Amino acid sequence: MSYLAQLANKAQFDPYYLYERDIRTFLHNLPLTFSPLQGENMARFLEQNGYFTFSFVRHPFDRLVSCYKDKVENFQPGGPGEDIYRKTNGNTTFNNFLQMIIENHKDSIRPDWHWMPFYEKCYYCYINYTFIGRLESFDESVKYILLEANLTNIIPLEQATMHLLATDQGSQSHKLKKFDGKASARTLQYFAPISKLMIMKLYEIYKKDFLLFGYNIHGLLD
């Protein structure tokens, strides 16, 4: 965490910084990508200093629905949803949002940070993470991290619960359950009118995320 603070140009790191402030604002100040040399240097730094490293993943299509609801349906000028709002003249349907992602990928336009594939932004090729958690079982994963990293004196276990965005309320339970790799019921509803061709194009864009983390598209092509 000290290393992340340095990347964000923090002169001194307060261990309560991430806990008491808006973590999203903090993360948005970090560099989006690293060069291979930077990635190797970061991995070496973390390993040599014995840091407990972790990352969280989520079903790729659950991410797309969440991003759409938070960034497009709740459009704010200057936010990530502005691009699709401009390109569609305000016709910001879920289908058009997905089509924009496909077209940008085809034209090699770098995706927005919010829906960029995990493998492109979380440095899995460089960092041997101590733990990779799933948003589907977030509460239990966070408790495990707090215990393993000896952080319970900062964040008590009873406070290790998911604070959902309003757009994610009711989307799924984040308690521990048997993992099946499937998309949430809400995502199945959003994708129901989407063509199989478009779904397969999106699958190809996020294919590495699906394969790396054991997710699937069962129920999405029925």
Image (spheres, helix red, strand yellow):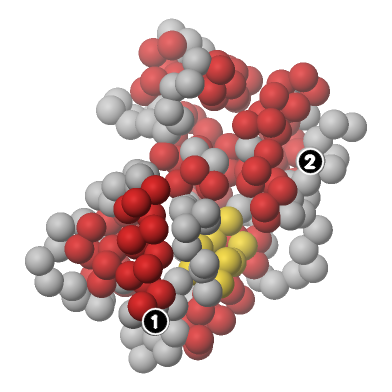
The residue furthest left is 11
Residue 177 locus on image (x, y percent): 75, 70
Quarter that holds the C terminus = top right
Side of 127 relative to 96 (left or right): left
Q: Quadrant of residue 61?
A: top right
Residue 65 locus on image (x, y percent): 60, 38
Q: Residue at x 10, y 66 (%)?
A: 11
Residue picked out by circle 2: 217
Query: Quick check: can you spot residue 41?
Result: yes
The amino acid type found where label 2 is placed reads Ile
Gap between marks 1 and 2 measured at Cα: 37 Å
Q: Quadrant of residue 7?
A: bottom left
Q: Nearer the viewer, mark 1 or mark 2?
A: 1
- The answer to which of 122 and 92 lies nearer the viewer is 122
Q: Is residue 20 above or below residue 144?
A: above
Q: Quadrant of residue 78?
A: top left
Residue picked out by circle 1: 50
Quarter that holds the N terminus = bottom left
Q: Is residue 57 above or below residue 174?
A: above
Q: Residue at x 52, y 54 (%)?
A: 125
Side of 145 relative to 30 (left or right): right
Residue 200 locus on image (x, y percent): 75, 27
Q: Residue at x 38, y 54 (%)?
A: 39
The residue furthest right is 222
- The answer to which of 170 and 88 lies nearer the viewer is 88
The amino acid type found where label 1 is placed reads Gly
